[in-house]
Image (tube, rainbow, N blue to C red):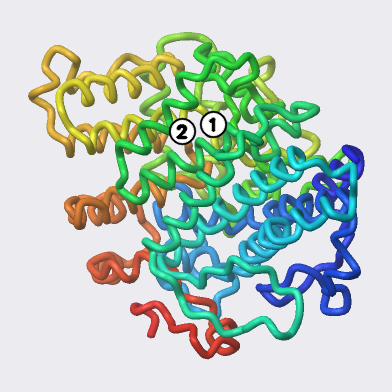
């Protein structure tokens, strides 16, 4: 059984063929539940397909999470990806299609509905194993909806699998609040049975399948997005204060930082999307290929913007020690290319470690990290800043400085525990944004960090949010960019045109009507 799951998850070999309809779970000719869901192997196969489809989401995760934040850019303005970063994307643009996320949701919905029925047909399929499978399905559905809600704000909320033509194709959008509550309800349901695993057989599975730790991280991030800051702290602490032997841990040694990216699946990792080019000829969509290095770099390639490159260089000059850090040959390579002298090349998915800083991967199959401990720690810090109070602010500052210490950087000089009452919420939030920008460069988080900053607390920091983007986006025309950012509806992507055409109840997002 483990071998079957491994082959399906890593190679993408399909037990069931792909399907174009975004509500589909199985091909039209194999959707009868009488023909499937007979054994535990059937459940595992569909669950594995959920993970396989999640891998196909990675290019979207990168585009949606990075380009509008302008730390990572594509120099070519007229490219499909360039349209995203310049807020000129259209409903017909292929880079805003959401179908792959709904395919993951469809797989998860099928497992949630039909896995319990398999116990009546397969005596070896015990309730404990079934509940464990459900926890993974809840995670896959919740994570997919979190990406959708952050990018489209309101989307159709599908919780039933598409199994025959009697299922409705027309579904209206649900509100952001409803979607966030479904995610939180799913995580609670997953954790309530105590069936979520702490580990699986093999490191790749522990880091590549949804564990209890991954559910905690998903809940912490969802609560942060929902402005439920106390609950965010609660779930972050479930990870930070965990004592289990195989828990994810923050790796405090500077020289270990690059191990998160090569070879990957590090102790700090909570959940990462797996790639394996060697054993399964699977590398398409890996960040190693999305972020090219060397002669593969073109005008259409992703790279750090000039302002981000300068920040990385500035941090490197502050770097105290000799061990590799998150800057020079950590996050970026300093090689200057004649056509793009002002941009830094994204290195963290191309390098091979600290022994030879210029050694380039020969096999381009880096995993894509969704959650790691530093992320959860800084989620907690952000929530503490928003909650307020000198004790919370002092703890948040300590977390920020702990992350900096790992990169051999001095503590922030603007404020300390001794004069924390002289700080402001805005000052601390910007310090946190700076830290997240550097720590998670090219990890698909920058736009969401900025969007939280701009939208939360009734758009309290909208003006500063706009200023940060305009300071960093050097590819869009200033007057245009200023006008777009004034309209908070433009902060979200358009509903794909094809889905508007095929779904009579689906309405376009306001800015694109």
Q: Which residue occupies the extreme left position in the image?
A: 422
Rendered view: 180 above or below 269: below
Quadrant placement of the C terminus: bottom left
The residue labelled by disc 1 is 372
Q: Is residue 389 left or right of residue 93?
A: left
Rendered view: 99 above or below 29: above
- At numbered mark 1, what does the secondary structure look like: helix, strand or loop? strand
Q: Nearer the viewer, residue 440 or 393?
A: 393
Q: Which residue is drawn at 62% across and 27% down?
A: 260
Q: Nearer the viewer, residue 1 or 413?
A: 1
Q: Nearer the viewer, residue 2 or 476?
A: 2
Residue 185 shows in the view: yes
Quadrant of the image occupied by residue 349 = top right
Q: Where is residue 382 in the image (x, y as percent from the top left)?
A: 31, 35
Q: Which of 26 and 310 is in front in this view?
A: 26
* Mark 1 crowdedness (10 Å alpha carbons): few <14, some 14-19, many ≥20: many
Quadrant of the image occupied by residue 19 = bottom right
Q: Where is residue 151 in the image (x, y as percent from the top left)?
A: 45, 62
Q: How many labels does the image show?
A: 2
- Residue 193, label in figure: none
Quadrant of the image occupied by residue 421 = top left
- At numbered mark 2, what does the secondary structure look like: helix, strand or loop? helix
Q: Position of residue 430 (x, y in %)?
A: 25, 37
Q: Which residue is drawn at 82% across and 55% down?
A: 118
The residue labelled by disc 2 is 375
Q: Position of residue 136 (x, y in %)?
A: 67, 45
Q: Residue at x 57, y 32 (%)?
A: 213
Q: Is the residue under label 2 in contact with that under label 1 (CB below 8 Å)?
A: yes
Rendered view: 367 above or below 502: above
Quadrant placement of the N terminus: top right
Q: Residue at x 68, y 28 (%)?
A: 265
């Amino acid at each position: 059984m483990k071998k079957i799951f491994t082959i399906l998850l890593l190679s993408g070999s399909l037990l069931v063929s792909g399907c174009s309809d975004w509500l589909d779970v199985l091909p039209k000719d194999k959707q009868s539940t009488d023909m499937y869901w007979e054994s535990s192997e059937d459940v595992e196969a569909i669950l594995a397909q959920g993970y396989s489809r999640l891998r196909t989401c990675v290019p979207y995760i990168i585009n949606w999470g990075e380009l509008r934040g302008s730390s990572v850019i594509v120099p070519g303005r007229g490219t499909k990806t360039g349209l995203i970063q310049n807020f000129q994307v259209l409903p017909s643009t292929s880079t805003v299609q959401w179908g792959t996320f709904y395919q993951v949701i469809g797989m998860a919905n099928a497992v949630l509905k039909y896995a319990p029925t398999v116990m009546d047909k397969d005596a070896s399929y015990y309730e404990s194993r079934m509940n464990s499978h459900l926890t993974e399905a809840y995670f896959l559905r919740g994570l997919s909806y979190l990406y959708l809600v952050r990018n489209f704000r309101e989307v159709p909320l599908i919780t039933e699998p598409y199994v025959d033509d009697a299922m409705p194709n027309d579904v209206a959008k649900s509100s952001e609040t409803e979607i966030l509550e479904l995610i939180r309800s799913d995580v609670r349901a997953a954790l309530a049975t105590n069936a979520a695993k702490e580990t699986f057989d093999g490191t790749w599975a522990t880091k590549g399948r949804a564990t209890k730790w991954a559910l905690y991280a998903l809940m912490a991030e969802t609560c942060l997005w929902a402005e439920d800051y106390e609950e965010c702290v609660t779930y972050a602490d479930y990870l930070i204060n965990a004592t289990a032997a195989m828990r994810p841990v923050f790796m405090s040694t500077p020289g270990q930082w690059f191990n998160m990216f090569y070879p990957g699946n590090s102790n700090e990792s909570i959940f990462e999307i797996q790639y394996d080019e060697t054993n399964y000829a699977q590398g398409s969509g890996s960040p190693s290929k999305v972020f090219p290095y060397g002669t593969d770099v073109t005008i259409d390639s992703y790279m750090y913007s000039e302002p981000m490159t300068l920040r990385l260089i500035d941090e490197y000059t502050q770097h105290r020690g000799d061990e590799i850090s998150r800057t020079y040959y950590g996050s970026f390579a300093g090689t200057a290319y004649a056509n793009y002298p002002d941009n830094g090349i994204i290195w963290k998915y191309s390098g091979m470690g600290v022994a030879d800083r210029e050694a380039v991967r020969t096999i381009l199959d880096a995993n894509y990290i969704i959650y790691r401990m530093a992320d959860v720690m800084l989620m907690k810090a952000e929530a503490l800043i928003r909650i307020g109070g000198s004790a919370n602010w002092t703890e948040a500052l300590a977390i920020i400085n702990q992350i900096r210490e790992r990169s051999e950087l001095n503590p922030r000089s603007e404020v300390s525990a001794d004069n924390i009452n002289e700080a402001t919420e805005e000052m601390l939030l910007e310090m946190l944004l700076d830290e997240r920008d550097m720590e998670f460069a090219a990890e698909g988080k920058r736009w969401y960090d900025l969007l939280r900053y701009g939208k939360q607390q009734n758009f309290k920091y909208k003006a500063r949010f706009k200023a940060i983007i305009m300071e960093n986006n050097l590819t869009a025309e200033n007057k245009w960019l200023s006008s777009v950012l004034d309209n908070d509806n433009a902060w979200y992507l358009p509903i794909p045109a094809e889905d508007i055409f095929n779904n009579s109840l689906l309405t376009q997002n306001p800015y694109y009507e």
